Image (tube, grey):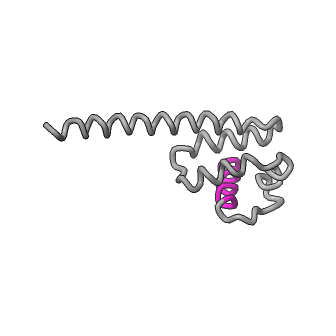
Amino acid sequence: MAILPCIAGASELKIHINMIKKNLRSRLYWQCRRGMRELDFALQDFLEANYDSLSDTEIQAFQELLTYPDPLLLEYVMGRMQPSDSAIENVVSRIRSTVTD
């Protein structure tokens, strides 16, 4: 009988974690709206196609990437510049592969 509360608690925790991830996805999707159509499409398409498979490190890198100014972000996505941070570079590479697929 002592196991049942743990199972219920684990289930509730899983539901709570899923809600947090869904809320984060929504916030990130909103932040992908940059005002430059090319960036909007690239970032939103990447997020839709890859969010569920992103690691925590990749999500953090993507969040950081979204703080960059649009001109720099466009240079990265277009492949004209490479980020110096390897985690950001990995995410940019994934974004570029999503755009070209």
Spot occupied by residue 53 in the image (x, y as percentages of width and height): 51, 49
Q: Residue at x 78, y 50 (%)?
A: 68
Q: Residue at x 68, y 39 (%)?
A: 44
Asked if residue 13 is positioned above or below residue 53 in the image, the reply reads above
Q: Residue at x 77, y 63 (%)?
A: 82
Q: Is residue 23 magenta?
A: no
Asked if residue 82 is positioned above or below residue 66 in the image, the reply reads below
Q: Exactly how many numbered labels are in the figure?
A: 0
Q: Range of the magenta residues?
A: 88-100
Spot occupied by residue 94 in the image (x, y as percentages of width and height): 64, 54
Of all residues, the one furthest to the front in this rendering is 2
Q: Choose top left, top right, bottom left or bottom right for residue 45.
A: top right
Of all residues, the one furthest to the left in this rendering is 1
Q: Residue at x 66, y 50 (%)?
A: 62
- Left or right: residue 12 versus residue 1 is right
Asked if residue 93 is positioned above or below residue 84 in the image, the reply reads above
Magenta segment, prevailing SS (helix, strand or loop)? helix
Spot occupied by residue 19 in the image (x, y as percentages of width and height): 48, 33
Which residue is nearer to you in this view: 41 or 89?
89
Which residue is nearer to you in this view: 23 or 9?
9
Q: Is residue 90 magenta?
A: yes
- Left or right: residue 76 versus residue 62 is right
Which residue is nearer to you in this view: 41 or 9?
9
Asked if residue 26 is positioned above or below residue 70 in the image, the reply reads above
Which residue is nearer to you in this view: 3 or 63?
3
Work out which quarter of the rendered image holds the N terminus and state it. top left
- Left or right: residue 73 versus residue 45 is right
Q: Choose top left, top right, bottom left or bottom right for residue 28.
A: top right
